[in-house]
Amino acid sequence: MNKIKKGDNILVISGKYRGKTGKVLAVLPREEKLKVDGVNVAKKHARPRRQGEKGQIVEIAAPIHISNVKLICPNCKKATRVGFEIAAKSKDAKAQKSRVCKKCSQMING
């Protein structure tokens, strides 16, 4: 289970975009990277696809390493580390693992 998921709000803690916040657009677990809205924006030149159409410069979110961000807790609204809590396991069901804010000890949805 990943500590940061798609849709989470994060704070960039190091690098060129330090101090910026944004919403996670995509998580790339094998590469340990994620794409964040408005952070690490790259410009890509797009060719015209149809006749008569013009080429254009498109801005896309490039991946940023997961170690350079902190999750913003939806409960206490602070940048925090993420822990895990395992709920009690019943006979017929699997144990549920959930994310927990290290500052306020509240469960994080998602």
Image (cartoon, grey):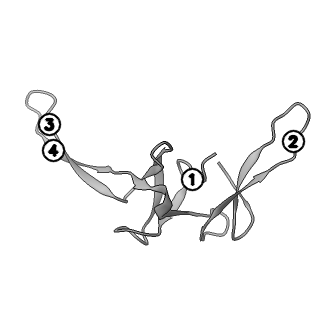
- Crowding around mark 4 (Cα neighbors within 10 Å: few <14, some 14 to 19, many 20+) is few
Looking at the image, which residue is at 43% across and 72% down? Answer: 19
- Which numbered circle lies on residue 56? 4
| Residue type at numbered disc 2 | Lys
Verify CB contact (< 8 Å) between mark 1 and mark 3. no
Q: CA distance from mark 3 to mark 2?
A: 55 Å
Camera-nearest label, 3 or 2:
2
Horizontally, residue 96 falls left or right of residue 44, namely: right
Looking at the image, which residue is at 51% across and 61% down? Answer: 10
First in residue order: circle 1 vs circle 2: 1
First in residue order: circle 1 vs circle 3: 1
Residue bearing mark 2: 89
Q: CA distance from mark 2 to mark 4?
A: 55 Å
First in residue order: circle 1 vs circle 4: 1
Verify CB contact (< 8 Å) between mark 1 and mark 2. no
Give x and y (percent) for residue 79.
57, 69
Q: Quadrant of residue 82?
A: bottom right
- Crowding around mark 1 (Cα neighbors within 10 Å: few <14, some 14 to 19, many 20+) is many
| Residue type at numbered disc 1 | Ile
First in residue order: circle 3 vs circle 2: 3
Residue bearing mark 3: 47
| Residue type at numbered disc 3 | Arg
- Crowding around mark 3 (Cα neighbors within 10 Å: few <14, some 14 to 19, many 20+) is few
Pick out the residue farthest to the right.
91
First in residue order: circle 4 vs circle 3: 3
Residue bearing mark 1: 4
